[in-house]
């Protein structure tokens, strides 16, 4: 931890904690501010699989889940090679020593391009929570002692969609907020029909339901599916949980589940408009990606109520947009990574949508499915082919600072930033990188 961060305990606005998480931690897959950014400084511009490596630790299996870090511990969700086990692991952030691992479930379910350990864990500095595509949901303390567990599949039917389940829980005000946005019938075993889509709030201390609210939509077939994660947004002092999917961007009251507003982003109804990316936010605007890439990005004004129309849209961008990656707002700019084709990264003025620069990340065969993270005036990207690219943030020109081959694909987890270090998850290893 940097001296600056060690001396000031900044309580993260998104969490109510018994032991404060600091802004130098990475407690959620989108970081301490839930937007993919960190205030950390003196971060590495370049490295290799041996250079600037503090430690590396073997992982038991592949997963797309981003690691989370708090109070000197790194928490990892994982599958296990040669078994159906779904695991939770904890590593010491300083040494890379594995402190504990727990088997929290098992599933032989197979889905394309994914597995059952895709949801990222989340921590409040004292407890850590894991969720899996098999429906397993569990809370543990930082020593790995189970506090409670339940299975949402058993309670509500198959939560796994065509490509599994990848929504990560949001922890806020001692509540776990969970999105289950699916069509009304399952794609595969266990077969289920008459399924509902809903937001669920769970007491983080006990695992018991606090509220469950249906997510109403007129979307069709696969467009009912959303792999997106809920995120907290501060709207002029009002707390809102943003959810993107099933043809609507919605804002929900975290205390009750009541819907504040919704915006219908589908330009026409389609049976194939499933959503993967999560919303972004910054500077009084909320950013949403229309489905499947190439259908545009919209910037929605904060402060709405009820059904919002296009007059609430501040601006739109119809250039290259992602199918998977979540947009990143950092220091007045919005970064949009289209992970298909040439892997085009675009920098837009976050307030006006003016394009400042655009360039191709290049490298080996795409896709790029990990979302961009930012800190120390740098952008950190990593491709499924395990190529990391570091770029200069801001400015008026596209500038690649370094390109690093991590040599261990596939990689789908975002790069996490904590205590002046980068934490990079490859197919079989967890790296800690530092200057």
Image (cartoon, helix red, strand yellow):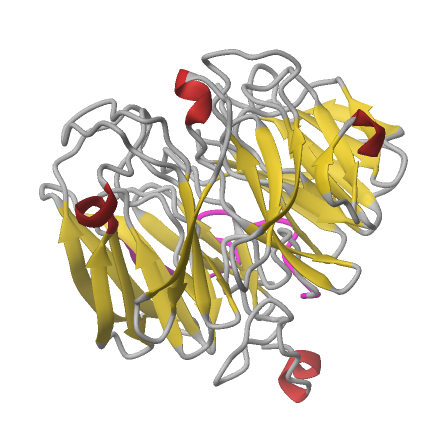
- Magenta span includes 144: no
Q: Which residues are magenta?
A: 40-59
On screen, residue 38 versus residue 55, left or right, reads right
- The answer to whether residue 75 is seen in the rendering is yes
On screen, residue 372 versus residue 209, left or right, reads right
Q: Residue furthest left?
A: 83
On screen, residue 185 versus residue 373, left or right, reads left
Q: Residue furthest bottom?
A: 7
Q: State the residue at coordinates (19%, 30%).
A: 192
Q: State the residue at coordinates (86%, 27%).
A: 355
Which picture quadrant has residue 422?
A: bottom right
In the image, 355 versus 314, the foreground residue is 314
The percent position of residue 376, horizontal first and vertical second, equals 73, 58
The percent position of residue 183, horizontal first and vertical second, equals 36, 26
On screen, residue 167 versus residue 399, left or right, reads left
- Magenta span includes 43: yes
In the image, 420 versus 354, the foreground residue is 354
Magenta span dominant secondary structure:
loop
Q: Quadrant of the C terminus?
A: bottom right
The percent position of residue 272, horizontal first and vertical second, equals 46, 14
Total numbered labels: 0
Q: Quadrant of the N terminus?
A: bottom right
In the image, 150 versus 319, the foreground residue is 150
- The answer to whether residue 96 is seen in the rendering is no
The percent position of residue 140, horizontal first and vertical second, equals 28, 72
Which picture quadrant has residue 117?
A: top left
In the image, 53 versus 263, the foreground residue is 263
Q: State the residue at coordinates (29%, 33%).
A: 195
């Amino acid at each position: 931890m940097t001296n600056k961060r060690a001396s000031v305990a900044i309580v993260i606005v998104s969490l109510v904690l018994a032991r404060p998480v600091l802004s130098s931690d990475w407690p959620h897959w989108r970081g301490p501010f839930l937007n993919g950014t960190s205030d950390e400084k003196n971060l590495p511009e370049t490295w290799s699989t041996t250079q600037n490596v503090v430690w590396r630790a073997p992982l038991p299996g592949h997963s797309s889940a981003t690691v989370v870090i708090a109070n000197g511990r790194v928490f990892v969700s994982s599958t296990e090679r040669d078994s159906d086990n779904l695991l939770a692991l904890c590593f010491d952030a300083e040494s890379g020593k594995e402190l504990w691992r727990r088997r929290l479930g098992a599933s032989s379910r197979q889905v394309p391009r994914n597995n059952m350990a895709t949801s990222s864990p989340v921590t409040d500095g004292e407890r850590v929570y894991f969720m899996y595509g098999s429906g397993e949901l569990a809370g543990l303390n930082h020593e790995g002692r189970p506090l409670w567990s339940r299975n949402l599949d058993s309670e509500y039917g198959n939560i796994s969609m065509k490509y599994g389940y990848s929504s990560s829980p949001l922890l806020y005000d001692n509540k776990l907020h969970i999105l289950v946005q699916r069509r009304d019938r399952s794609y595969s075993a266990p077969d289920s029909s008459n399924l509902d889509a809903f937001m669920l709030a769970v007491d983080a201390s006990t695992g018991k339901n606090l509220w469950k609210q249906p997510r109403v939509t007129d979307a069709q077939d696969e467009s009912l599916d959303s792999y997106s994660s809920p995120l907290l947004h501060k709207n002029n002092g009002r707390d809102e949980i943003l959810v993107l999917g099933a043809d609507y961007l919605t804002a929900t009251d975290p205390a009750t589940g009541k819907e504040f507003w919704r915006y219908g982003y589908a330009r026409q109804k389609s049976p194939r408009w499933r959503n993967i990316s999560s919303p972004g936010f910054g500077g009084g605007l909320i950013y949403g990606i229309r489905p499947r890439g190439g259908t545009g990005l919209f910037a929605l004004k904060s402060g709405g109520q009820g059904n919002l129309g296009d007059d609430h849209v501040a601006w739109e961008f119809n250039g290259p947009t992602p199918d998977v990656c979540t947009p990143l707002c950092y220091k007045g700019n919005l970064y949009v990574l289209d992970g298909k084709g040439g892997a085009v990264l675009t920098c837009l003025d976050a307030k006006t949508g003016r394009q400042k620069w655009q360039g191709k990340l290049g490298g080996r065969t795409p896709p790029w499915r990990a979302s961009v993270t930012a800190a120390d005036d740098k952008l950190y990207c990593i491709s499924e082919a395990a190529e990391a690219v570091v770029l200069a943030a801001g400015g008026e020109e596209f500038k690649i600072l370094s390109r690093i081959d991590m040599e261990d694909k596939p990689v789908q987890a975002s790069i996490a930033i904590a205590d002046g270090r980068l934490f990079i998850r490859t197919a079989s290893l967890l790296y800690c990188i530092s200057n």
